[in-house]
Amino acid sequence: MELNLQPLNLPGIEPVRPIVIAGPCSAESEEQVMSTAKPLADYGIKIFRAGVWKPRTKPGGFEGHGEKALPWLQRVKKETGMLIATEVATPQHVELAMKYGIDILWIGARTTANPFAVQELADSLRGIDVPVLVKNPVNPDLELWVGALERINSAGITRLGVIHRGFSSYDKKIYRNLPMWQIPIELRRRYPALPIFCDPSHMGGRRDLIAPLCQQAMDLGADGLIVEAHCDPDKAWSDASQQITPGVLDFILQLLVIRDETVTTENITGLRHQIDEIDNALIELLAKRMRISREIGQYKKEHDMTVLQTHRYAEIIEKRGVQGSLCGIDPSCTKQIFESIHSESVRQQMEILNQK
């Protein structure tokens, strides 16, 4: 379904990239909140974020002060003029957030992954005019993300945006949550008017990754950033390793290169035309490959051979990976391409074997 979207229209915030939301992972104390908010405001940050309800992966950690912390955010708004934002996960959270004048709500990754919870939130938001940002679900499931947006939008929330915080993986490698940029890129293709914020703190999980992830997000056209900043990050009660000081955040933002999306593409039109010609040739070559694959399928049917020839598949993946690497293509990219090609070949041969 199409989303009925309106601009976020955040009071006092110019729609200039990047819109920055910053503040601590958790609102730990009134002193900590104010000690973080005031320097952020001095550095020009217009939107303050802090977690009031903090569901943790395992019990026993700090899970937020709840309603007790909401007046602290009110004080931030009163004394600095910043807009205030927090996460909501239940209808009661929504009710309390509205009671205390929270300007922006976001829905966390664990909540987005649960359609029942999202629907309850959508029902509680009906009739309320407030911007809502929806984080991607924990796992790389674009349709689940879109489904959450549709549920919230169907409740009448038109000032809608998303937060890309990366996707959980058993093999963590460098990042806490893998960026998998192709997913928000596809989301942007489907909904060009949907604002996308990048959360480099949760994506990287480490302070030293925040700056490069911010730049990558800007290079890929993200509208904003939501960054965890703390007055004393090493002593943070939650996610200490991914928080930075307001001063470091300002330094990162000053170094960001914001490239213009509206610059004329006239100078690269010729190169794009060459790419179009190559893409057309690739499709023709793939079609030729599939015709040969179907002929092989017919031979397998006539000689009672199984479709999957494991040794041949392994040979293709290994050889093409080496070839790709020699041509400057990442082996994992080559592997993914030929896995897809092989999967389609298998599908077509299965059709032939099952024909009567």
Image: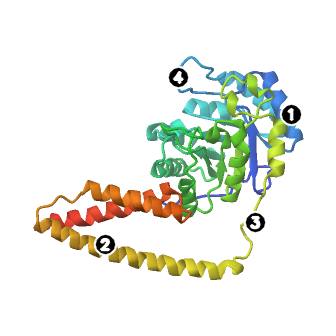
Marked residue nearer the N-terminal end (3 or 1): 1
Marked residue nearer the N-terminal end (3 or 4): 4
Marked residue nearer the N-terminal end (1 or 4): 1
The x, y position of residue 162, in whole percent, is 61, 49
For the residues labelled 3 and 1, the Cα–Cα distance comes to 31 Å
Query: Which residue has dot 2 on it?
Result: 290
Which residue does the image show at 63% across and 45% down from the upper left?
Answer: 132
Alpha-carbon neighbours of circle 4 within 10 Å: few (<14), some, or many (≥20)?
few
Q: Residue 346 falls in which quadrant of the image? A: bottom left
For the residues labelled 3 and 2, the Cα–Cα distance comes to 41 Å
Alpha-carbon neighbours of circle 3 within 10 Å: few (<14), some, or many (≥20)?
few
Q: What's the amino acid at mark 1?
A: Lys
Query: Which residue has dot 4 on it?
Result: 58
Which residue does the image show at 84% across and 44% down from the upper left?
Answer: 251
Q: Are marks 4 and 2 in contact (CB under 8 Å)?
A: no
Q: What's the amino acid at mark 2?
A: Met
Please say if 50 is above or below 13: above
